Amino acid sequence: MHIYLPDIKRQKGLPIDVLLESSLEDILGDSHESGQVEASFNVSTAGNEIILNGKIEVQTITECSRCLESFNLLYYIDVNEVFTMETGDKSKESTPHSLALESAETLTVNGDYLYLKEYIRQVIILERGNSNLCADYCKGICAGCGKNLNITPCDCGHKEDEIDERFLKLKDLYSDN
C-alpha cells in the first residue's frame, strides 16, 4: 500500500483520488482476524507537505464479547493527516533530543513513495474496540451453564442477583451505618 509521490507533485497542489485495497491479514500481520481494508484518500501537496484526507473502511469477521458468536463488523475511520517530505538538509545544530522530538511529532516521507501499510495498521489498531457486540440487545451467555441466552433461555437455576461469596465484604461498603 503505497502512493507514488512524483504523480502527486506534478499536480501542483491539485488533489488526486487514490484507492488502496488489501486484506486485513496483510495489514495486521500475525492477527487471527480476516477481512478487507479499503482506503480511499484525497492526496495533495502544499510545499514540502503531503496532505492526506479520506477514510478507511474495515470489514471483518469478529467475535461478540457477550455471546461469543461470530458476526460481520463494518466500521469506518476518518483520516486527516499531513506528512512532511524530508529534504535531506538537516541542520548541524540539531541535537539527538530535538531530532527525536521532531520524529515523534512529525510523520516524514523519504524518497518517491509514501508507504501507508504501517500507518494504516496503527490507525486500525487504535480505532477498533475491545468489546465488539453483535447487537446492542445481545443477552450474552449464562454464567452458570454457558448457554447462549439469545438462542435459548437458561434452565440451570443460576441467578444473576446472587452474590459471589468472595465479594460479600464489598456489600458492607454500601450498607447504611
Image (tube, rainbow, N blue to C red):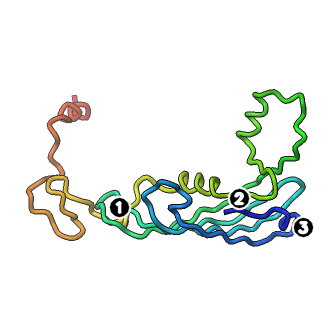
Rate crowding at label 3 as few (under 14), some (14 to 19) or many (20 or more) other CA atoms within 10 Å. Answer: few
Rate crowding at label 2 as few (under 14), some (14 to 19) or many (20 or more) other CA atoms within 10 Å. Answer: few
**Residue in front for this viewpoint, 41 or 34:** 34
Residue at numbered disc 1? 64
Q: Residue at x 91, y 66 (%)?
A: 12
Left or right of residue 26, residue 90 in this image: right
First of labels 3, 1 by sequence position: 3
* Quadrant for the N terminus in the image: bottom right
Determine whether label 3 and label 2 are within 8 Å by CB.
no
Rate crowding at label 1 as few (under 14), some (14 to 19) or many (20 or more) other CA atoms within 10 Å. Answer: some
Indicate which disc residue 10 carries: 3
Element class at badge 1: loop
Q: Work out how far the residue at label 3 is from the one at label 1, CA to CA, in angstroms.
A: 47 Å
The amino acid type found where label 2 is placed reads: Asn
Left or right of residue 29, residue 81 in this image: right
Q: Residue at x 63, y 53 (%)?
A: 118
Q: Provide residue 84's location: percent of width, then percent of height.
A: 81, 50
* Front: mark 3 or 1: 3
First of labels 1, 2 by sequence position: 1
**Residue in front for this viewpoint, 87 or 66:** 87
Indicate which disc residue 80 carries: 2
